[in-house]
Image (cartoon, grey):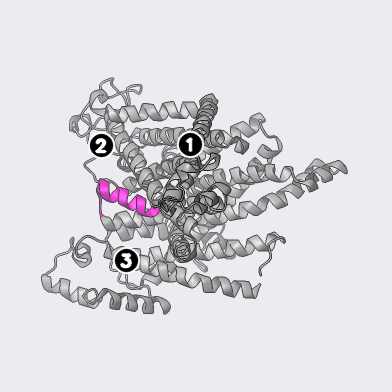
Amino acid sequence: MGTRGIATDEQLPTLADPAVAAGRSRREIVATARRLARNRMAMFGAIVYLAIALMALLAPVIAPHDPGAQQLLDRLKPPALMAGGSTEHLLGTDNLGRDILSRLIYGARVSIVVGLVTVTICAVFGSLLGAIGGYLGGRIDYLLVLLLDIWMAFPFLVLAIAMSAVLGPGPMNLILALVLSGWVAYCRVVRGEVMSLRERDFVVAARVVGVSDSRIIARHLVPNVLGPILVLAMLEMATVIIAEAALSFLGLGVGSSIPTWGAMLNDGRAYLRQAWWLATFPGVIISVLVLSINFFGDGLRDALDPRLRNR
Amino acid sequence: MLNYLLRRMFLLLPVIVGISILTFTLIRLIPGDPVAIMLQDQPHTAEDLSRIRTQWGLDEPLLVQYGRYVRQLVTGDFGRSFMLQQPVLSVILDQLPATIELAVVSLVISLLIALPVGVVSAVRQYSRFDRIGTVIATLGISMPGFWIGLMLIVVFSVKLGWLPASGRIDYVAGLEPITGFYLLDSLLTGNLSALTSTLKHLIMPAMVLGSAMAALTMRMVRSSMLEVAKQDYVVSARAKGLKERAVIVHMLRNALIPTITVLGMQISGLLGGAIVIETIFAWPGTGRLTVQAISSRDYFLLQGIVFFFAITTVFFNLITDIVYGLVDPRIRYS
């Protein structure tokens, strides 16, 4: 805590005055949001993402069939538009006669939730570590950099695959494996940002008047690195969703009882000759989701820092 | 330079120790008894379990186990594969040429796409070519490589029947392996049908891995070309009437410097991507070996592969740093 009786950051004029800072940052947020709203690609991305998220949320209402219900007499039915297809199963059925459309709708749940949860935990955990190392410097920072160097020696997907193989299937283990593999990126970025912010006037001023380290990190540093964290989080969400699909594809994901797009691709792999649609639709929807996130992420980056536009 | 190298190697020591701790911890994270899990598909008795546990040293204190692990690693002993009953390192090295061959061809493909597209996009910034190129690059990083692989198989193997869906070479090509790199071997032995067969097997997996890399490299080439375009020497080169083509060559040489870092970083992505892509195309490399190790619960093999991949990444990062200095005279090793 800050040294009582002398001054706290609330009493500082202008530079660290929360009211002034809040006014400025509110103006900045509005300006950023305006720039973002004018970016058509970014808005398109946001709408598509929200539509898929809504589909995941409303899966029990909108899915035409139970995603696990097997109709063995209706195995490998083609999509409705093809010869032999029916409107009963718009995107056809898989090798066990399960409705592909319904499985796609339910599969969105895993991708959306795993993406959001993993990215949030990684961002909070990685950023905190990075902020602490970057701000404190010295031996703690040396250890952090060593830890980062060690972790970065492991390719993300290799580590995620090995971790999930060892931990076993299940939603919690999957997220744990992805978090343990993915936190480094945030830590690196935030550490770098904080190191450069540490010497800026407003941080020095706060330190001089005796504001505690934890308060400086929380009130002055974190708000200033939120932009880069958000942009990184968007990029990472795309990576995590593809990684989750890859893990499920290899049979390492949330487990066989829950429909996922990656597992559907794996099911379809054995039927590429007879039923190409099995492996086609899950890939299309993964690509659409990831593309929407990338469009939004690019727009967000441009909106936060207009100088980077189209670079 | 030698001084710098030695210092870098010395600084790598704690990283390598850290890597060994992490890989050692990895298989100790297994919930339950790893030996029981490894043996779960085979008939066994409680005596078998304890005998194997003793044999692998799993009943000793962790520190003793780690000490032995490090001693083994130093002598190049990565342990024994449970599935293949062979030394882990020799299993990895057996499969390595296939992965290296795939990686090198993918890298070449990615550069063949990324360099021209990146340069033209930057030179004609905001043109239709630039816009389409950027959208395709975003598409390229958004589509999962393993799905593109499956779709290529549907089109080129199943529907058209032009390309083989799996393996490295047809047996009938009768190639006598010398180096283990089939492209090289077929050239060395003058075996034309082996060369064609190898190329046919390589093209799809290499395209998938290469195009994913190309998207990132292309973005990097484009943005560093745009960065370089503002430099004084480019302006003066134009001012003194140098042909545009010559100016671009000038620019490219400097724009390639940051691109090298991206290429170095992609080695790690390539190793991860290879696991899934090799599995799809039944490519007999280290990536598919990883999946086989996992599905047969051969944890010692998995541990060895992960350690090997990490050391490879560290090695390539070092190479990237050195090359970076060689091509950029502004960087001095002091």
Tell me, yes or no, whether the two marked residues, 3 and 2, touch with CB atoms within 8 Å: no
- Above or below, A207 against A87 in this view is below
Q: Is residue A177 magenta?
A: yes
Residue at (32% x, 74% y) in the render: B66
* Circle 1 chain: A
Which quarter of the rendering shows the N terminus of chain B? Answer: bottom right
- Is residue B295 in sight in this rendering? no
Q: Secondary structure at mark 1?
A: helix
Residue extent of the magenta highlight: A168-181
**Which percent across, then down, holds residue B324?**
64, 60
Q: Which residue is the site of mark 3? A: B25
Question: What is the three-letter code of the residue carrying label 1?
Answer: Asn
Callout 2: chain? A
State yes or no: residue A162 in magenta: no
Circle 2: residue type: Asn
Taking the spot 33% from the left edge, 78% from the top edge, the residue there is B67
Separation of disc 3 and disc 2 at Cα?
40 Å
- Which residue is the site of mark 1? A294
